[in-house]
């Protein structure tokens, strides 16, 4: 017993993605958790002793075998990949909230908003046609960006977009106010959409948000804004969108443009019709990658605080789904 006490509980990295390289995480974690075993799934029976599981798309079977487990850490900000596993051990689930990840997401959102605002598709076509003509360009202040999922990432991106001059409104479950922004709650979706020219979704995937961005929702965006039509950007989760409806809206022209970083099925299959849909930017779920060096120290600090009897922070509410 005393021997077990003197040896700090092991950490298990459990990631079921075939092309995932655990090396950078193992190296970063060993630096910030000196003296602690950092195991990967390959370590078989020894892995069953892990006290903390650091996971991305974990397997239910593996989690069930961790009889000493005290907490699960998501290796990302989202946790649908954990909650989807089904019956989970009854331990706290912690997600990533970190400046590095937040800054990366804001970069992506600002990049895509500017891409559509500055008419990048139209100028790319003009370039191909050697067509030297300036297009009418609305000012940022004339354009309203509506951020669905106005939480940690949404508010930070919203602040940066505001400082570029865009009008930014937020939509969140609680409708809790955020200084400097108009914030709508779940029961005010219609009013939020009606004034939105560029819709940015940073929603988590939950039973409530699954499939919510469909043709009906897209049809409620402001149709006659200064860009000539609405735009949709999704860097939250692909399961929140109905991809056939986005394809139709882009082909029919009711959607001026779209940017998708996340998809119902990832990797996006080679023959998927999204690949050939016009005025669509596709990126392979890279909006805000989890950087092992930037994020490991936060996980180590949480473990140290927890073992010193202080509460874990950034806890997930499994009932709410995020
Ligand atoms: P937060 O939990 O801080 O924010 C989530 C927001 O969504 C909150 O504002 C919440 O409302 C709102 N929300 C949740 N459910 C509903 C609902 N049913 N109706 C209206 N609003 C709702 O999460 P983060 O901002 O840190 O992350 C958001 C998501 O971004 C992650 O869950 C993940 O899926 C995705 N992500 C994607 C990455 C990528 O590379 N593409 C990288 C990192 C994250 P309230 O504030 O009232 O609780
Ligand atoms: C995350 C992600 O949730 O990368 O952090 O998708």
Image (spheres, grey):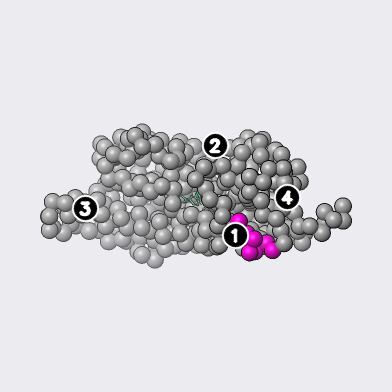
Crowd tier of the residue under label 1, counting other residues whose Cα lies within 10 Å: few below 14, some 14–19, many 20 or above: some
From the image, state whether disc 3 or disc 2 is nearer to you. 3
Residue name at image x 30 percent, y 55 percent: 115
- Marks 3 and 1: in contact by CB < 8 Å? no
Dot 3 surroundings within 10 Å: few (below 14), some, or many (20 or more)? Answer: few
Residue 172 image offset from top left, x and y in percent: 50, 49
Marks 4/2: CA–CA distance: 30 Å
Q: In the image, which residues are magenta?
A: 26-34
Q: What whole-number distance in Å separates the C-alpha atoms at marks 3 and 2?
A: 39 Å
User: Which badge, 1 or 4, is on the more N-terminal residue?
Assistant: 1
Q: Distance between the Cα atoms at labels 1 and 2? A: 36 Å
Q: Residue under circle 2?
A: 207
Determine the CA span between mark 1 and mark 4.
Answer: 19 Å
Residue at disc 1, secondary structure:
helix
The residue where tag 3 is placed is 124
- Please state the horizontal and vertical placement of residue 193, each as a whole percent of the image: 39, 45
Rendered image: mark on residue 162: none
Residue 72 or 211: which is nearer the viewer?
Answer: 72
Q: For residue 110, what is the image quadrant?
A: bottom left
Q: Going 46% across and 59% down the picture, which residue do you hit?
A: 104
Residue lying at 47% horizontally and 55% vertically, measured from the top left? 288
Question: Is the distance from the Cβ of mark 4 to the nearest ligand 2 atom less than 8 Å?
Answer: no
Mark nearer the N terminus (3 vs 2): 3
């Amino acid at each position: 017993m005393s021997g077990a006490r003197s040896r700090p509980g092991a950490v298990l990295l459990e990631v079921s993605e075939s092309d995932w390289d655990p090396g950078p995480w193992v190296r970063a974690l060993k630096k910030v958790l000196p003296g602690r075993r950092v195991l990967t799934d390959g370590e078989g029976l020894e892995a069953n002793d892990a006290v903390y599981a650091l996971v991305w798309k974990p397997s239910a079977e593996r989690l069930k075998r961790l009889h000493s487990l005290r907490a699960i850490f998501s290796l990302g900000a989202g946790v649908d990949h954990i909650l989807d596993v089904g019956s989970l051990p009854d331990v706290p689930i912690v997600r990533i909230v970190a400046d590095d990840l937040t800054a990366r997401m804001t970069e992506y959102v600002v990049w895509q908003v500017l891409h559509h605002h500055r008419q990048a598709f139209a100028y790319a076509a003009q370039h191909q046609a050697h067509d030297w003509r300036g297009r009418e360009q609305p000012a940022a202040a004339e354009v309203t960006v509506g951020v669905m999922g106005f939480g940690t990432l949404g508010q930070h991106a919203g602040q940066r977009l505001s400082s570029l001059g865009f009008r930014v409104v937020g939509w969140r479950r609680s409708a809790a106010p955020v200084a400097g922004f108009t914030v709508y709650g779940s029961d005010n979706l219609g009013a939020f959409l009606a004034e939105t020219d560029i819709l940015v979704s940073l929603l988590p995937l939950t039973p409530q948000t699954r499939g919510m961005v469909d043709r009906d929702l897209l049809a409620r965006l402001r149709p006659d804004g200064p860009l000539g039509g609405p735009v949709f950007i999704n860097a939250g989760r692909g399961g929140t969108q109905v991809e056939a409806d986005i394809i139709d809206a882009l082909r029919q022209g009711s959607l001026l443009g779209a940017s998708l970083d996340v998809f119902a099925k990832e990797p996006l299959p080679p023959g998927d019709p999204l690949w050939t849909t016009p005025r669509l930017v596709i990126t392979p779920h890279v909006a805000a990658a989890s950087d092992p060096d930037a994020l490991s120290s936060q996980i180590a600090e949480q473990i140290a605080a927890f073992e010193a009897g202080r509460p874990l922070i950034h806890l997930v509410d499994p009932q709410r789904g995020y």
